[in-house]
Image (tube, grey):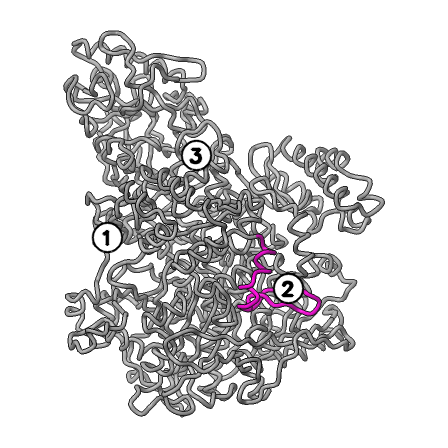
């Protein structure tokens, strides 16, 4: 409890100036009752390299003196308390009696992980079902500051550890509950929340990324405990924010706040994977080659190397001379790409290729290339030759040498490693990212930490010099004397709307003292906190976004000229910048030759903002801080009370230590370095990025927010006297890194001895790459007969690790579920399961045998839902695999209806529909609902949409008295990067307001069409042509809103147009590109294509005959070609005559089936007299073609494209285009018909090509 226990010195192995005793690591006490003495984490000697002289750093423990009570099992709750222990908390972990239900299984589940989770904690064994256990628990609750419960809602209430019971014993307690699913969600109330169950029910195991989709893998398994890892960091952040509120209230003389929160693991999981479930509409220039390939026709799924060739050359894996793969991640950033080219030594070759510089922020309609250097894609025309150059260059040196060269040049790149290789690397040991306990046991270091840097020349006892501005304290409403701290009010946003992040814009003088105290107690937990966010990409900006959820006022500051292309700034910013204000300002210090310039500068305005700020957030290295004048010394000279929150890629608790401390890196680089890609891909020969965008990124941002809130807690506790004030001037620095959080994502695989971890890596059954569908036969994904998937979670451990009686009972219950399973168990059951423990090889073979038998059984009949019901009736756990698209359909609501109120029926999964988003359409994204409280107390959700960059430049600069006009004129500030929200897309002002996206329940899907893939498309493009850069003529895209399309009047009631429905009657998705049928029913383009491919000859809704049968389509096409040939010979009718035989057009939108490039915006969908579907348009010749034979650009053709009539007919899936010469084409697998020219001979210039993946019956006339 002495001050020496709060901070440990970081010198050359000596103690700090206050004679803090050295901490004994790994010290254990053999006291009765199963108790163990907590051991402090090691203190290290970091050195920050900067131009400012610094004293040694001090490791601050914000939770020193706080008692945390841990009541949970397995991973989630213990890991959350481990984070708090790393921040200095005293953690008491309540353990179940050894013989209790589930305790034996938990002991057998990864004992090395359990040992790591118990390190540094006091273990107390209590039987909470007895009166004695309850009395002892009550004593612990009364002495605790925080209680973390990891049991289900029912178990928590039954054991008397719910928030009402705990607050009755201790009203000052902060209560945190971590259930698998929301306690208010009746749908999942009875579902046991195993990690695999949560992953399956949350849609994580389906799709699994672009690579798996291109490989044709509908479902895959990941062994990473994503839900537990994400929720543990989120819970630690929420607890820290609540403690900040408690300290502020105590300073105002308040107590008994009864603070509480709930963090459902499934909600935290999808919150961290928010970038994977976004749905929005953008121009196709933003679609990567892999995304476009998903809609391209291909005879078979792509293999690993074919998929690799679709990646951008600056965002791919390359083999080095030592055969180890190297991962370069340099898209969207021009300087990174130029430096990479220089390091590889291929400058002249790239120059010879003529790769252009991309104009990524041009307005819609500009002619400069959008692909090239500096863009998210270099372009299809240059991807292959540039990849070949880079591939040959990497083969000249070993991987680790390239790693050092790329790091020194400031290019994000890393050599691939296994997890064991990462843990054993010198950088990890030196940086403190991994701790080694007695006996050689390894465990990850802290996920977040706070250091304090001693400064010189800023006064005594932490006070600023006489001429410095007043010190601004964080969060608190009053200072130590009870007076309101002076804060200049900021103006209200334009339009009278409340400010993002819940900023209080009312002047403090306008509120009396009582009202200030009331607001301090009932408002968001971090209200009053002012944050300047200078971070970029995903993880860094997520820090500010998470703080905004708790009420902080966050101002996002970016340079007047963008550094990254819109794929990063705008699309990633949709989630990462929610709740912020945006300012474009040059914050760099003035150069030496302009120091005497009296003109206004962006730096001066920035310093005015720093004087009002509590926190400055920046993601970058120490060297970058020095270049920008953002070191702790620089900032404290402006505002002595400001906190620097710094986030980087490879940093650890030993600040500045390690060879890679100043290397740049993204999420993907850390996945490669930490061994995540090697594990997920199946080995170093087949490395693959983990399925989801931001596997580490968003969680790392939450970790950075945790460190920031912990630093704020230090300031609040020092103000209240709970922590001692340093004797010398200091600056607080909050720290986290991608590496520290990435280790938490694979926490179980980072705990244990090197030998045990090496053995696990060599024998793990989850290292099968795309073929991995589970950990063993009874924890496995299985496909049902109808194509749906289920996750069987009969046991956590394989049969070989269970006692014989328990294994036999499990198999008996499984066999009782259905006759097919009884036969599977009989075929797969091995003698070793019944009689003796098998050796490793035998156990693996037996598990494979059982797995194969169960796969045949589940695939023989029924659906996944039916199997889940049958297994549940037999007492076997299973859950149907959900998808992001299915959850989005069932759980979408208007953005204003985000529900985090525990007193309501808030659902686990909530997707928010942002109608008429500024991007030019509708946006659907997962709600910020990972933290919930009663009445939403302490939170500021939903957040405002991410603003357009520069939207608040004028407002914010005015608030600090800066001459914004002069700053803009001198290019020190800007009010926009582009006139539209997303460059190249129509702004919201020029587009019609969107309609609600489909939110019908998944149970309403058409069960008669199980062959249809009705999963929602994550990225819906407007299909503007992107092939101009490959030499194919550009074709104008059609992008009309459904509401504005012209509809023809019907000639009869039956043929009249039906109002466009909100959703397709087949897949229930938003009707983005409707296709009208003769019966007036409308399908989405995807379902129409698939119905045609499947040979359906009638409407799938009413069964009216339609042109959906390939044979009928072929006959109609042959008749049309005969008429067309006659027209070319001089006949008066051709396609126009065909059009004349069609009834009055029915309703249609501007686009037809997916994959068609339309030539003009005059499109209509019309039923013929025979009830066939026909799509007609008036079309000029495609660009580059003439209407006279032999003239213009022939493109290798013997006859120019020359439609003579005013109407050029397009039948279902047919559009006039030129392709490479072909003599004939396929209409179906059994029919081959040649095209005829005007002379009756074969025309080699036109052919039919497939447009639907894997469907040879659906074709496109090209």
Q: Which residue is mark 1?
A: 980
Q: Which residue is mark 2?
A: 442
Up the image or down, 1237 lies above or below 662; here it is above
Up the image or down, 62 lies above or below 1169; here it is below
Assess disc 2: are there few (<14), some (14-19) or many (≥20) residues with their C-alpha within 10 Å of its C-alpha.
many
Residue depicted at 33% across the width and 70% down the height: 627
Q: Nearer the viewer, residue 387 or 455?
A: 387
Secondary structure under tag 2 reads: strand
Q: Position of residue 848 (x, y in %)?
A: 70, 39
Assess disc 1: are there few (<14), some (14-19) or many (≥20) residues with their C-alpha within 10 Å of its C-alpha.
many
Residue depicted at 60% across the width and 74% down the height: 41
Locate residue 1183: give its quadrant.
top left
Q: Distance from label 2 to label 3 (Cα)?
A: 53 Å
Is residue 990 visible to the viewer in this orientation of the structure?
Answer: yes
> Where's the N terminus, which quadrant?
bottom right
Residue depicted at 42% across the width and 87% down the height: 729
CB under 8 Å between callouts 2 and 3? no
Q: What is the magenta range?
A: 418-446
């Amino acid at each position: 409890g002495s001050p020496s226990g709060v901070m440990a010195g970081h010198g050359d192995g000596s103690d700090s100036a206050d004679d803090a005793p050295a901490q004994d690591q790994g010290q254990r006490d053999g006291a009765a009752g199963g108790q163990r003495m907590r051991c402090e984490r090691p203190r290290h000697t970091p050195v920050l390299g900067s131009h400012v002289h610094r004293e040694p750093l001090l490791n601050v423990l914000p939770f020193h003196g706080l008692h945390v009570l841990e009541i949970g099992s397995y991973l989630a709750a213990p890991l959350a308390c481990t984070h708090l222990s790393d921040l200095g908390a005293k953690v008491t972990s309540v353990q179940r009696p050894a013989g209790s239900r589930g305790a034996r299984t938990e002991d057998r589940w990864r004992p090395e992980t359990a040992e790591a989770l118990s390190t540094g904690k006091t273990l107390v064994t209590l039987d909470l079902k007895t009166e004695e256990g309850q009395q002892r628990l009550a004593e612990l609750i009364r002495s605790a500051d925080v209680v973390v419960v990891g049991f289900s809602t029912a178990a928590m209430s039954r054991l008397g550890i719910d928030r009402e019971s705990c607050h009755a014993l201790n009203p000052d307690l902060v209560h945190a509950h971590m259930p698998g699913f929301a306690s208010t969600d009746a749908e999942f109330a009875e579902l046991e929340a195993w990690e695999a169950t949560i992953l399956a029910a949350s849609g994580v195991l389906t799709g699994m990324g672009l690579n798996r989709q291109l490989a044709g893998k509908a479902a895959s398994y990941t062994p990473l405990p994503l839900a537990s890892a994400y929720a543990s960091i989120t819970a630690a952040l929420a607890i820290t924010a609540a403690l900040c509120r408690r300290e502020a209230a105590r300073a105002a003389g308040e107590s008994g706040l009864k603070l509480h929160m709930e963090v459902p693991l499934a909600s935290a999981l999808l919150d961290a994977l928010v970038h994977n479930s976004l749905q929005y509409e953008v121009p196709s220039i933003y679609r990567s080659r892999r995304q476009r390939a998903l809609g391209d026709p291909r005879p078979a799924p792509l293999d690993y190397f074919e998929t690799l060739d679709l990646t951008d050359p600056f965002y791919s894996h390359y083999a080095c001379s030592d055969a180890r793969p190297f991962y370069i991640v340099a898209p969207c950033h021009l300087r990174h790409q130029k430096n990479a080219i220089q390091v590889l030594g291929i400058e002249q070759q790239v120059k010879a290729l003529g790769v252009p510089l991309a104009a990524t922020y041009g307005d819609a309609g500009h002619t400069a290339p959008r692909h090239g250097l500096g863009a998210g894609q270099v372009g299809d025309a240059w991807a292959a030759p540039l990849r070949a150059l880079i591939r040959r260059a990497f083969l000249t040196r070993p991987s680790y040498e390239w790693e050092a060269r790329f790091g020194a040049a400031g290019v994000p790149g890393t050599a691939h490693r296994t997890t064991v290789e990462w843990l054993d690397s010198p950088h990890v040991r030196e940086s403190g990212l991994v701790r080694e306990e007695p006996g050689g046991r390894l465990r990850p270091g802290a996920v977040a930490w706070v250091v304090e840097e001693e400064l010189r020349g800023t006064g005594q006892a932490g006070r600023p010099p006489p001429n410095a501005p007043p010190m601004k304290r964080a969060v608190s409403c009053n200072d130590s004397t009870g007076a309101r701290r002076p804060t200049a009010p900021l103006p209200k946003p334009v339009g009278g709307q409340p400010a993002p992040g819940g900023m209080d814009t009312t002047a403090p003088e306008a509120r009396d003292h009582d009202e200030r105290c009331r607001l301090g107690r009932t408002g968001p937990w971090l209200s009053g906190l002012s944050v300047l966010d200078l971070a970029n990409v995903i993880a860094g900006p997520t820090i500010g976004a998470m703080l905004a959820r708790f009420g902080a006022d966050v101002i996002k500051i970016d340079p007047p000229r963008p550094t990254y292309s819109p794929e990063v700034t705008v699309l990633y910013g949709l989630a990462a910048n929610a709740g912020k204000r945006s300012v474009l300002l040059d914050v760099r210090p003035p150069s030496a030759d302009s120091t005497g310039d009296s003109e206004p500068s962006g730096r001066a305005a920035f310093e005015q903002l720093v004087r009002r700020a509590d926190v400055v957030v920046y993601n970058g290295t120490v060297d970058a801080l020095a270049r920008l004048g953002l070191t702790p010394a620089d900032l404290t000279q402006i505002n002595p009370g400001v906190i620097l929150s710094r986030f980087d890629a490879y940093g650890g608790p030993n600040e500045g230590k390690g060879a890679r401390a100043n290397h740049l890196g993204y999420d993907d680089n850390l996945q490669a370095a930490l061994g995540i890609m090697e594990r997920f891909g199946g080995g170093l020969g087949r490395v693959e990025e983990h399925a989801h965008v931001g596997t580490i990124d968003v969680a790392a941002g939450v970790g950075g927010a945790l460190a920031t809130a912990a630093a704020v807690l230090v300031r609040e506790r020092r103000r209240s006297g709970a922590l001692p004030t340093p004797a010398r001037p200091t600056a607080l620095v909050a720290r986290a890194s991608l590496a520290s959080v990435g280790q938490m994502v694979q926490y179980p695989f980072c705990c244990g001895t090197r030998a045990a971890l090496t053995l696990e890596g060599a024998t793990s059954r989850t290292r099968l790459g795309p073929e991995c569908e589970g950990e063993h036969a009874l924890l496995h994904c299985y496909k049902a007969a109808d194509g749906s998937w289920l996750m069987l979670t009969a046991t956590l451990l394989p049969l070989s690790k269970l006692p014989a009686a328990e294994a036999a009972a499990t198999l008996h219950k499984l066999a009782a579920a259905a006759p097919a399973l009884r036969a599977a168990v009989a075929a797969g059951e091995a003698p070793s399961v019944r009689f003796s423990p098998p050796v490793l090889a035998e156990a693996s073979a037996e598990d494979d045998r059982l797995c194969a038998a169960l796969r045949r059984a589940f695939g023989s009949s029924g659906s996944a839902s039916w199997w889940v019901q049958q297994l549940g009736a037999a007492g076997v756990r299973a859950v149907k695999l959900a998808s992001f698209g299915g959850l989005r359909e069932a759980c979408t609501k208007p953005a204003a209806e985000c529900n985090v109120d525990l007193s309501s029926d808030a659902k686990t999964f909530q997707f928010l529909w942002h109608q008429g988003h500024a991007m030019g359409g509708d946006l659907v994204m997962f709600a910020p609902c990972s933290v919930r409280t009663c009445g939403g107390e302490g939170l500021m959700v939903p957040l405002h949409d991410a603003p357009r960059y520069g939207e608040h430049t004028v407002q914010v600069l005015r608030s600090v008295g800066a001459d914004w006009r002069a700053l803009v004129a001198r290019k020190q500030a800007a009010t926009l990067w582009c006139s539209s929200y997303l460059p190249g897309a129509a702004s919201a002002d020029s587009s019609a307001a969107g309609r609600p996206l489909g939110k019908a329940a998944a149970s309403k899907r058409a069960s008669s069409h199980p062959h249809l893939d009705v999963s929602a498309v994550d990225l819906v493009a407007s299909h503007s042509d992107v092939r101009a850069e490959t030499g194919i003529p550009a074709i104008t895209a059609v992008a009309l809103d459904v509401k504005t399309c012209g509809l023809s009047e019907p000639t009869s009631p039956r043929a009249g147009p039906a109002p466009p429905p909100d959703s397709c009657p087949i897949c229930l998705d938003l009707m983005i590109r409707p296709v009208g049928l003769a019966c007036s029913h409308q399908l989405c383009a995807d379902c129409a294509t698939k119905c045609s491919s499947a040979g359906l000859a009638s409407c799938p809704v009413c069964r009216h005959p339609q042109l959906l049968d390939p044979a009928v389509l072929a006959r109609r096409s042959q008749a049309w070609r005969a008429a067309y040939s006659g027209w070319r010979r001089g006949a008066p009718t051709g396609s126009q005559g065909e059009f004349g035989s069609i009834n009055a057009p029915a309703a249609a939108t501007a686009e037809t089936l997916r994959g068609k490039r339309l030539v003009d915006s005059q499109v209509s969908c019309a039923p013929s007299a025979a009830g066939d579907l026909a799509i007609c348009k008036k079309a000029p010749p495609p660009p580059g073609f003439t209407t006279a034979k032999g003239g213009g650009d022939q493109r290798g053709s013997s006859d120019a494209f020359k439609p003579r009539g005013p109407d050029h007919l397009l039948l279902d899936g047919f559009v006039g285009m030129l392709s490479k010469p072909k003599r004939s084409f396929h209409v179906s697998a059994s029919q081959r018909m040649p095209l005829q020219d005007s002379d009756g001979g074969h025309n080699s210039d036109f052919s039919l090509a497939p447009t639907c993946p894997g469907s040879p019956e659906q074709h496109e006339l090209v």
